Image: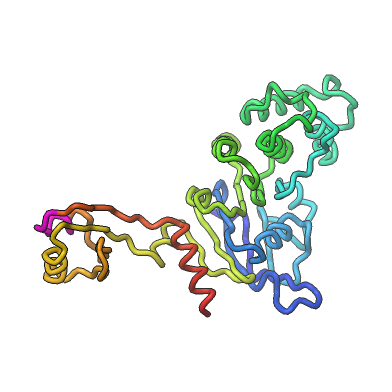
Amino acid sequence: MQPIIEVENLVKCYRKADRNAVDGISFEVMPGELFALLGPNGAGKTTTISILTTTLSATSGRVKIAGFDLDRESGAVRQTVGIIFQNPSLDMNLTAEENIRFHAILYGLYPFRPAFGMMPKSYKDHVHSLASILGLDEDIFKPVRTFSGGMKRKLEIIRSLMHRPKVLFLDEPTAGLDPQSRIALWQYLQQVRQESKTTICLTTHYLEEAEQADRVCIINRGKVVSYGTPDQVKANLIDEYLLIDADDRNRLSAELKNLGLKFSDVPPFKVGLNGQSTHQILKSIATPLTVVQTHLPTLEDAYLAIMGQEDHE
């Protein structure tokens, strides 16, 4: 299967800048994947997304999206992708449907019509279908200024999906949303993926959101510092371990030494699994335990470890 996004040695250099905003990054995204681009503020995430969506030109490098070369076929790329920026780009004086309709007209999907009732049946059906998926069907004719932050995000997703893009780019899609709205929005995005087979490429500050990604690319200072599945990124940096304690700590410590296990000096003892299962280690310990906790590394653990390494270089 061919990648739907191919990025090779992408560079963006701003005039008078002391370093490249994007400095030779490369990655691939497969069709239907959820791909997360992670990194601290100023790492180059938004610059990369802006280049991939043709809103910013690259200094050098090669990009292909859905088989189209970004430099030579930018018009075809624009027809292939949808984009939701970090800051809302909706007209607050229009209704939700009017925002959608004018977007569809600008994309050349339909000729201009001054009212929803005058639009073709295919447009009406598509709007109602997407609005139903995202839970906005009852609000589609209301003014956007009456919408909550979560509703505005949903509307932007509907609008960006009207031309049936193969790739949907989302720059911090849940920024500023309350926890309930964030969870709901992710449920809708997953539903959109399943029903339309859309590839989703996003940037986010919320590491728990990136846990759901098929692959992640962590960048810092414009360079790729880690790339792979969330499990691969975690496995390369963070070990699983057991946290155990006992009333007789001296006995437990001596037993751990006899078993040849690596563990921390300070209780509760942090015991590395070293390729063994949790069950195997616990079965080998005779000392009665008062604390048993299994630590499974998170993407946030790996991210913090990577950023810590970067800071010390």
Quarter of image, res 106: top right
User: What's the image's color scheme?
Assistant: rainbow
The residue at the far top in this view is 117
Identify the residue at image location x=67%, y=55%.
65
* Left or right of residue 206: residue 9: right
* Left or right of residue 271: residue 112: right
The residue at the far left in this view is 286
* Left or right of residue 302: residue 53: right
Identify the residue at image location x=42%, y=61%.
234
The residue at the far front in this view is 247
* Left or right of residue 114: residue 302: left
**Magenta span:** 280-288
x and y, in percent, of residue 115 in the image: 87, 23
Q: Nearer the viewer, residue 198 or 138?
A: 138
Looking at the rendered structure, the number of numbered marks drawn on it comes to 0
x and y, in percent, of residue 58 in the image: 75, 67
Is residue 102 located in the magenta-colored stretch of the structure?
no
Q: Nearer the viewer, residue 212 or 205?
A: 205
x and y, in percent, of residue 243 in the image: 27, 58
Residue 306 against residue 183 in the figure, above or below? below
x and y, in percent, of residue 55 in the image: 78, 57
Residue 192 against residue 135 in the figure, above or below? below
Identify the residue at image location x=57%, y=59%.
38
